[in-house]
């Protein structure tokens, strides 16, 4: 991302808020599996629970489908936090997809840390189809945490340096 | 150039209350590639669907995005509508702006923005959708029923009577379940065994039912239409084919002091035993934990006395593989144990009620055994402590149920009715006895149910006290029950000779292991989850697996039986076709770039990927590549995320689609939310209707 587009970006966000620059809102992307977490988030909806509207959900069939590069791409495109959530260990709709995801994430975590990514901006969780409340809590906590951290400026600067 | 149609649903007020649908339409119409955008009050209704069909024809749409409820709710509806208008159904996507947006956020600018972004995301995905053809798979027309209680029995009989083979697996030595333990049933007071045992016999003798008792599910592989199930037949130590069920072994067994599970500890059984006289199959089993031969190495009294030479101490667990097309889960319930040592350590017990310490404090099923003609007392109500007839019994309802401080929030549903029944059974057997009932509310909806409770109170003279009991303690021969009557506001103390606790219904302990093997979801209490609480109450989210009875939540007999027949019917519908169509979300391999590292093979949970050799005309090996068998692949996409050379992709969730979704969300620098300027048509030739 160039300096130019960033100015444009803030211009966009400016249009959505006449409240001034203080109205920055965290952008959270959630990659969630179709069977557990997506249904859990549906349950939060049918139960009319409330959580901050900062999260954008991208549905994947299983956390096994999650490629760590999706996370990198999301940060590159301006996400301030990325959440990955699927079925609890043992409950995977596809038997073992979440185990593969966990393994991959464990390894990838080290690389992220090494490359200077703030690990508080990344979250991995298990939320079942029955845990609407847990989904709400996770989103609330995560969004609040990101809000305190502020925009992920470091990463954007980092990828600009060539 | 794609021509996507965007259809924004108001869902009555459900979406429109918090999301400005008109703005969503305006913003959507400006997204590149959107040819048409409109909104409507109820998109799923007939006029709503007609709107979609008309737009597809009029604008020659190449894809449809319906922004409405969760795809779990109506994706099928809209895909069907799109298909009917002549476009491949898999070109239709849903943006979830209800469950994930309007219902969980306040009416606010940011909620509408989120809706717009979700729509844009799905548009980006829809643009890259491919026409897919459902995968055809053969249906194995045999069913598996897990659990031999009344629900499992009913489901098995219905499927078998429908003309298909059924494999019925029961973990106990006999079918029958909890219903076999009951004395009489509400609201008719007909004898439970008299109505159940004929069905048990039918299950045992039906030519199309293969019964595996004393067996458990070891492994489940495959998918809808083609499950391969491995069943562990636990070593019974008795050759069921040689045994005639004469019962000689039971008489001779020297180990006689084992509390009977069937009589809930009110009677003892031997180590080799038939659980109850009407058992199906009426064949004994050796309880190896208590058998003297297995614990001490000598005895073999049963073997010596057996006229059929059926006792086999060397028997080992046997594994049987069964191919089935559909599965009915009917694992049932167990009672919450109130003395802290039960199978549910996560829930607090009721130490203050003295269950398990005082022999005259019973649970509902123990009282059923006392009242049952086949029970330990031959149907007489006698105190376990001294065998005396109790002249007053206090019944406590909601033990565990609806008690948040004990960790259980739900209502067990059956206890109000069975407690009323217990008071009647007691009155019928002990005419001068007095029944007291402590209750929170009386919940008796159901055909003839409220009349039944009124009868217990008004005609049979049970005294109902509204309030909870704080403590029960023994004073000589009596149990003192201290509680409150919240209607009069007074503290009450009742002297009872016996106390019966209506304990909560809980899922079978350890049942989650079975659910995990099946890949079906369950809630915090481990009740199995249905696909939709209202419209798909007997199906699991996992295709081909259905629910029957109390494994899903507390149920009484008529409900369990009705649901079992419903599940059987679902199985029969599935078996009415030779082939079924499966979602074409399957992985595919790009053979040109595959480097044959076989990592995909290793991660595939379904063993759906094979090694394929590519040869030239002369038969020389050119290269080896991975190949996906689409009828085995279930579309989890683990292979696609693992592939080093980016050669595996997942139809419906391709890398291209997912990356463009990410890109769309973060489309920094594009004014997505701005109003179109006057006279401006937006990007592309979009038209806002």
Image (spheres, rainbow, N blue to C red):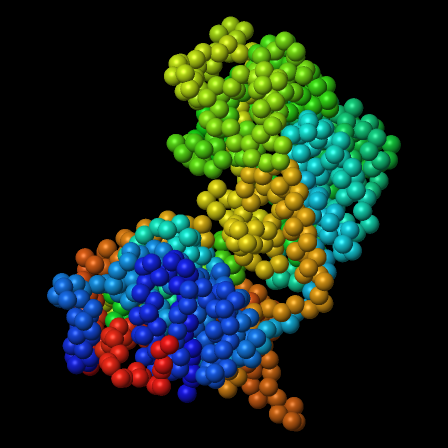
**Residue at image x 47%, y 37%?**
B410
Q: Is residue B422 above or below residue B165?
A: above
Q: Quadrant of residue A55?
A: bottom left
Q: From where the camera sits, is residue B600 visible?
A: no
Q: Provide residue B446's location: percent of width, then percent of height.
A: 59, 36
Q: From where the camera sits, is residue B560 visible?
A: yes
Residues B104 and B18: in front is B18
For residue B483, side relative to residue B412 (left or right): left
For residue B424, side relative to residue A142 (left or right): right
**Residue at image x 47%, y 73%?**
B51
Quadrant position of the N terminus of chain B in the picture: bottom left
Tell how many labels: 0
Quadrant position of the C terminus of chain B in the picture: bottom left
Q: Quadrant of residue B98?
A: bottom left
Q: Is residue B236 above or below residue B684?
A: above
**Residue at image x 63%, y 46%?**
B563
Residues B481 and B675: in front is B675
**Residue at image x 48%, y 47%?**
B523
Q: Provide residue B378's location: percent of width, then percent of height.
A: 72, 19
């Amino acid at each position: 991302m160039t300096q130019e587009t960033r100015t444009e970006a803030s211009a966009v966000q400016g249009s959505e808020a006449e409240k001034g620059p203080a109205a920055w809102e965290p952008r959270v992307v959630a990659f969630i599996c179709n069977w557990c977490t997506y249904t859990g988030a549906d349950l939060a909806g049918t139960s009319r629970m409330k959580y901050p509207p900062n999260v954008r959900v991208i549905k994947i069939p299983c956390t096994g489908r999650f490629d760590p590069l999706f996370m990198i791409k999301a940060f590159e495109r301006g996400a301030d936090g990325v959440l990955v959530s699927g079925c609890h260990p043992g409950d995977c709709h596809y038997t073992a997809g979440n185990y593969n995801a966990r393994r991959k994430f464990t390894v990838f975590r080290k690389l992220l840390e090494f490359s200077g990514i703030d690990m508080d901006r990344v979250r991995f969780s298990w939320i079942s189809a029955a845990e609407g409340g847990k989904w709400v809590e996770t989103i609330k906590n995560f969004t609040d945490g990101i809000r305190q951290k502020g925009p992920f400026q470091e990463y954007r600067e980092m990828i600009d340096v060539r | 150039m794609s021509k996507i149609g965007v259809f924004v649903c108001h869902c009555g007020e459900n979406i429109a209350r918090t999301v400005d649908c008109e703005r969503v339409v305006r913003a959507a119409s400006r997204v590149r590639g959107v040819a048409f955008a409109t909104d409507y009050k109820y998109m799923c209704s007939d006029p709503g669907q007609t709107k979609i069909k008309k737009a597809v024809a009029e604008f020659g749409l190449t894809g449809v995005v319906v922004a409405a409820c969760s795809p779990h709710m109506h994706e099928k509806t809209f895909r069907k509508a799109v298909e009917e208008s002549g476009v491949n159904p898999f070109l239709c996507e849903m943006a979830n702006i209800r469950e994930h947006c309007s219902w969980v956020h306040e009416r606010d600018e940011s909620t509408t923005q989120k809706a717009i972004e979700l729509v844009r995301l799905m548009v980006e995905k829809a643009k890259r959708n491919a026409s897919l053809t459902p995968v055809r798979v053969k249906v194995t027309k045999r069913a598996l029923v897990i659990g031999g209680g009344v629900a499992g029995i009913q489901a098995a009989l219905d499927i078998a009577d429908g003309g298909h083979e059924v494999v019925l697996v029961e973990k106990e030595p006999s079918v029958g379940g909890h219903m076999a333990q009951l004395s009489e049933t509400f609201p008719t007071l007909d004898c439970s065994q008299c109505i159940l045992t004929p069905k048990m016999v039918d299950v045992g003798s039906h030519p199309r039912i293969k019964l595996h008792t004393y067996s458990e599910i070891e492994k489940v592989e495959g998918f809808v239409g083609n499950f391969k199930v491995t069943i562990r037949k636990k070593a019974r130590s008795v050759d069921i084919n040689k045994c005639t069920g004469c019962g000689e072994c039971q008489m001779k067994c020297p180990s006689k002091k084992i509390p009977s599970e069937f009589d809930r500890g009110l009677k003892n059984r031997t180590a080799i035993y038939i659980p109850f006289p009407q058992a199906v199959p009426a064949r004994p089993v050796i309880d190896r934990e208590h058998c003297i031969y297995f614990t001490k190495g000598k005895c073999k009294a049963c073997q010596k006395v057996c006229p059929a030479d059926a006792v086999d101490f060397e028997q080992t667990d046997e594994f049987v593989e069964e191919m089935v097309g559909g599965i009915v889960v009917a694992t049932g319930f167990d009672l919450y144990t109130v003395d802290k040592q039960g199978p549910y350590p996560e829930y607090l017990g009721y130490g203050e009620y003295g269950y398990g310490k005082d022999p005259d404090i019973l649970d509902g099923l123990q009282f059923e055994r006392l009242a049952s003609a086949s029970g330990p007392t031959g149907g007489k109500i006698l105190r376990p402590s001294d065998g005396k007839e109790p002249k007053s019994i206090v019944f406590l309802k909601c033990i565990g149920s609806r008690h948040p401080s004990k960790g259980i929030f739900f209502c067990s549903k059956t206890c109000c009715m069975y407690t009323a029944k217990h008071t009647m059974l007691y009155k019928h057997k002990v005419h001068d006895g007095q029944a007291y009932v402590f209750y929170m509310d009386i919940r008796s909806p159901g055909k003839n149910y409220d009349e039944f409770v009124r009868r217990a109170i008004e005609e049979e003279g049970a005294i109902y006290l509204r309030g909870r009991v704080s403590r029960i303690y023994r004073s000589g021969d009596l149990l003192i029950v201290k509680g409150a009557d919240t209607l009069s506001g007074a503290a009450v103390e009742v002297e009872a000779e016996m106390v019966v606790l209506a304990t909560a219904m809980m899922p079978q302990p350890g049942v989650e292991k079975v659910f995990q093997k099946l890949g079906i979801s369950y809630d915090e209490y481990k009740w199995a989850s249905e696909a939709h609480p209202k419209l798909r109450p007997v199906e699991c989210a996992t295709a081909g697996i259905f629910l029957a009875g109390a494994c899903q939540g507390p149920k009484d007999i008529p409900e369990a039986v009705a649901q079992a027949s419903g599940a059987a019917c679902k199985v029969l519908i599935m078996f009415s076709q030779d082939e079924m169509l499966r979602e074409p979300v399957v992985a595919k391999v790009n053979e040109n770039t595959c480097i044959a590292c076989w990592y995909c093979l290793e991660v595939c949970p379904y063993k759906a990927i094979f090694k394929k050799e590519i040869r030239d005309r002369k038969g020389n090996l050119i290269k080896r590549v991975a190949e996906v068998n689409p009828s085995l692949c279930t579309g989890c996409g683990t292979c696609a995320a693992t592939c080093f050379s980016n050669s595996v992709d997942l139809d419906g969730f391709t890398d291209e689609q997912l990356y463009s979704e990410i890109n769309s969300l973060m489309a920094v620098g594009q004014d997505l939310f701005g109003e179109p300027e006057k006279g401006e048509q937006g990007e592309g030739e979009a038209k806002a209707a």
